Amino acid sequence: RQACSGAAAWCRAAWSGCRRGVSGRVCRWSHGLVAEGLMVDYSKWDHLEEEDSEEEMPDMRPMSLTDQKVHEWESQRLEDLERQAADLQPWQRDLVSKPKGAVVFMHGSGDSGAGIQAWLGHAWEGDHGDFEDTMSKHRYRVLFPDSGARPYTLAGGAPMPVWFDRSRMAFDAPEDDQGIQESVEKLDSLVDELIADGVPASNIFVGGFSMGGAMGLQLALRSRHQYAGCFMLSSFMASGSTQWSRLGVRCTIDEKGEEVSWERTPGAGDEVFALAKRVGRVLVSHGTDDSLIAFDWGEATAQGLEEAGIAVQFERVPGLGHELGEAQVQALVDWIEELLGKPADAAEEELPPGAAAAQQADGAREQTSGTGHGSGAMKAASPRRPGSAGVKTGGERQDGVIRFRVSPAGSDSHTAVFTVPQGWEEALAKYPVHARGASFDLQPGKLPGTIQSSFTSSSPEETAEAIKARLEQRLRDPAPPGAEDCCIM
């Protein structure tokens, strides 16, 4: 049932994407059922076994010629969509012309650099803009590399955009040492280019979301460079990793597979302590409601790193599932700024020669003509994310103003009515909302300033709260990349 529910959500999201065009998040749609092991093996459905009764397969009947044509057309459209998504590249915003540091942010399995960039872009916004904007205030550039495709066992051996293979989804699963080392060499080459451009490795943070976070830790442990720090968002490093022995610790799991304990390896020498010191600072952040990568796996990873003598900060995010959440990204920004300090004011931002004087002159002219706003220099507007410029919406930007009520409409069926700023009804209800692993259609309500959604859920209040959070994201950024919300990946 879980797989079929995911399939339905994926189809709705994919067709919504077909109508609107390809966005950075299409890659997440096209692989939504193989997220870290949640995979439907359609090959098993190709032929019915003789023992399958009509009662078990009530809807299996020959398709009419018209249905066959429609099916072929739909299949071709989805193939075209996935092919276009595979060619997407992260948007180079060039917010910093001469960066003094960088953040290498790696995507999860089945995703892409463009996909995680778009997701991160509207998952969080601070006083200085989104994550990339905020890092640019420190003169740090954010890079979103692509893993490339390799055979993935959890996808039945099909080529998938993953950093390494996984034979099974478990904390004690064996490690694809060869695949990890290949990705480390590829990422080291990327860092070599940054160093050639004048960015020292000691000013580079590495990490990512899900498999990308695991890859970030592996890079910090195996790379020929020493980085500023590593971050793991909703991620883990398996207890069977070869890196634990290099760190001089070993993991013990009880017979029930519930209790995890760590201990130092007897006789750990100077080489072990040198590796722990070399890794530097590590942030491990994990949601308590993560049903894909268990919260306990992330916590156990942090405990193992701490036992090895690494400076670890573990962040427990209540109520967060397997997704990038606002609180999680905020913790990442705070962690980075503990080392870098708060961003400089706009007056201290990097400017081309002579630009500062020109801005002061422009500001003075504005004040003289009565059009200034009390500032001697104008702030240059940061480039907006793709799809966000020039979009007309129903009102001004609003934060945290949505309320809701849920009414029963059947057995497990419910209708949630959301109170929103008047004039925003059509803009907020135009596209489906993706939350809690499913897609929810929205319609303008019967009263002005309301929209509603009907759904089936055993936890209607939590579902409505998740939809509300997505709608509030739309209020903060009326036109997120692709004009739709992010799927769980």
Image (cartoon, rainbow, N blue to C red):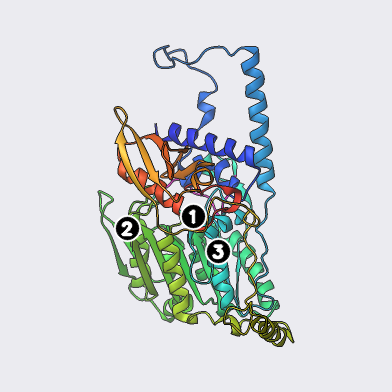
Asked whether 313 or 154 is in front, the reply is 313
> Residue at the spot x=41%, y=45% of the render?
436
Magenta segment includes 162: yes
Location of residue 331 by image quarter: bottom left
> Mark 3 and mark 1: span between their CA atoms?
26 Å
Location of residue 332 by image quarter: bottom left
Q: Position of residue 407 (x, y in %)?
A: 30, 36
Asked whether 406 or 377 is in front, the reply is 377
Asked whether 290 or 474 is in front, the reply is 474
Magenta segment includes 367: no
Callout 3 environment at 10 Å: few (<14), some (14 to 19), or many (20+)? many
Location of residue 452 by image quarter: top left
Would residue 356 be seen by someone viewing this image from the given angle?
Answer: yes
| Three-letter residue code for mark 2 | Pro
Q: Is residue 248 left or right of residue 70?
A: left
Mark before the other along the chain sequence, 1 or 2: 2
Asked whether 198 or 47 is in front, the reply is 198
Foreground: disc 1 or disc 2: 1
For label 3, the SS is: strand
Q: Is residue 383 left or right of residue 486?
A: right
Residue assigned mark 3:
105
Callout 2 environment at 10 Å: few (<14), some (14 to 19), or many (20+)? few
| Three-letter residue code for mark 1 | Leu
> Residue at the spot x=56%, y=40% of the render?
157
Q: What is the span of residues highlighted in magenta in the rendered image?
A: 160-169
Foreground: disc 3 or disc 1: 1
Foreground: disc 3 or disc 2: 2
Q: Position of residue 81 (x, y in %)?
A: 66, 39
Q: Is residue 311 left or right of residue 60?
A: left
Callout 1 environment at 10 Å: few (<14), some (14 to 19), or many (20+)? many
Residue assigned mark 2:
318
Residue assigned mark 1:
475
